Amino acid sequence: MDYNFIKSRLHLYAVLQNIEDLVQYDDEAKKLIKDWNVVIKFSVRKSGDVYLIFENGKCIVSETSPGKANIVLYFTSPAHLNKMFDGKANPIPLKGITKLSFLTREFPKLTKRLEYYLKPDDQKLKDNRFVTINTVMTLHTALFALKELLLFDPIGKHIAKKIKGSVLMMNVDKGPAAYLEQKGNSFEVHKGYHNNPLAVLQFKSMKIANDFLNGKMDAFSAIASGAVATKGHIEWLDAVSPVLDRIALYLT
């Protein structure tokens, strides 16, 4: 499968969903969108569509929308979308020309705030609030990206056959959680806890989760020390581990 296609899928379905968490956890973003009542559609030719639904001070990121989009941002190819994420291209506004000032002034403030949290550095990681938000986003990005790689990445597709009937959950002890569930020939990702996960990767603290998910902690020693606990079908966790490692091939 084409590299640009997979990368665009990760941008659409694993990165953009973080806006939901951004406006929930970050006061600056929350303030910025409090009066927004708008539906923005990202439409990428030969890749997919995503709707950002802003209403009542919240954001829902979804593949469908109950109403029509007020703004449609069109990308001529997966590579076009990827270039936008790299700051090297702009979308084509197919609808919402009258909202150009919103698109050029207000919306970029939100995406800059998202970028701030998605790019940790040693200075930012001294702030516990930053660690929390970055961990939530990294946890969710990992599972949404895992879904796309299991469906489209050559190695991921091979691994997908080994985890039939799986419900894999990642969570911080008494903290954020998300899970991936196989449904038919596809997978679904949900934020929050599953009542009966069949395989669990649990982090002892937010800091441990952050280090682990950002590749700053050796997985074997983390599990051996008890900082990270595994439960249930551990063979499924072992199977998806190399797929999770492949996220960096597309998103860095």
Image (cartoon, rainbow, N blue to C red):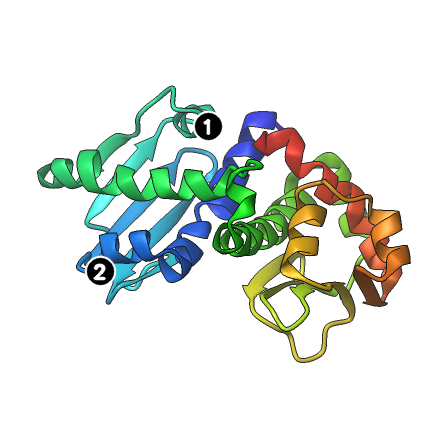
Q: Residue furthest left?
A: 98
Residue 226's disc number: none
Residue 131 coordinates in the image, percent (x, y): 55, 51
At x 53%, y 38%, the residue is 123
Left or right relative to 23: residue 136:
right
Instruction: Mark 2: give few (<14), some (14-19) or many (20+) Cα within 10 Å.
Output: some
Quadrant, the N terminus: top right
At x 17%, y 59%, the residue is 35
Residue 224 coordinates in the image, percent (x, y): 91, 56
Q: Amino acid at mark 2?
A: Lys
Residue where numbered disc 2 is placed = 34
Left or right relative to 6: residue 52:
left
Residue 181 coordinates in the image, percent (x, y): 66, 64
Residue 221 coordinates in the image, percent (x, y): 88, 49
Left or right relative to 3: residue 106:
left
Above or below, 73 relative to 58: above
Quadrant, the C terminus: top right
For marks 1 and 2 on the same chain, the one whose residue lies earlier in the sequence: 2
Residue 211 visible in the current orientation:
yes
Query: Is label 1 in a helix, a strand or a loop?
Result: helix
Residue where numbered disc 1 is placed = 82
